Amino acid sequence: MKEGKLTWIHLGEALGESNNIGFHLGRMSPHNMDNMEPMWSLLQYSLLRVNALLLAINFDFLERGSYSLSMEEKEKLEAVVAIYRSIRKDVDDYDDPQLELIMESLTEHMIMIDPHYEEAREKQTMGK
């Protein structure tokens, strides 16, 4: 498998965002969000899966002493960066961002990161 190169900027950006969002996720309770509860739960699930991927990359670094990534790992990390950029753009562009639109824009990237995402998404949308 070919090795991919990733800049420290991308990794730092993703890790910083993940830690920041992880902190806030722990304080959010989707049970108080009425009909938006399934979407908020899916967003939390998505961001926790992203965080798990970033932690796995960090543990691999500790084992190998290098951030050399396979092409699959590089694609997943690029999907992470795209997810955070998409969320940031939607929040910055709209006074009242629509959670359903944000989640729709994340689907393609989340499927790359989490093979169980589509199943989790279907369960959440059935709960609406």
Image (tube, helix red, strand yellow):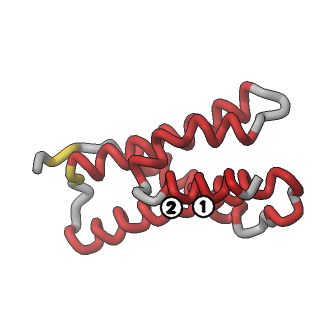
Residue 107 is situated, as x and y percent measured from the top left of the image, at: 53, 42
Tell me the tag on residue 49. 2
Q: Is residue 125 above or below residue 108?
A: below
Residue 62 is situated, as x and y percent measured from the top left of the image, at: 29, 72
110 sits left or right of 95 in the view:
left
- Report the front residue among 108 and 54: 108
Q: Is residue 74 above or below residue 15?
A: above
Compute the Cα span from label 2 to label 1: 6 Å
Tell me the tag on residue 45. 1
Residue 9 appears in the picture as rendered: no
- Residue at 37% x, 67% y: name it: 56
Residue 108 is situated, as x and y percent measured from the top left of the image, at: 47, 39
Count of numbered badges drawn on the protein? 2
Where residue 89 sits, quadrant-wise, is top right
CB atoms of marks 2 and 1 within 8 Å: yes
Where residue 63 sits, quadrant-wise, is bottom left
102 sits left or right of 70 in the view:
right
For mark 1, give the secondary structure: helix
| Residue type marked 2 | Arg
Where residue 64 sits, quadrant-wise, is bottom left
13 sits left or right of 105 in the view:
left
Residue 13 is situated, as x and y percent measured from the top left of the image, at: 49, 46
- Residue at 42% x, 61% y: name it: 53
- Report the front residue among 123 and 1: 123
| Residue type marked 1 | Tyr
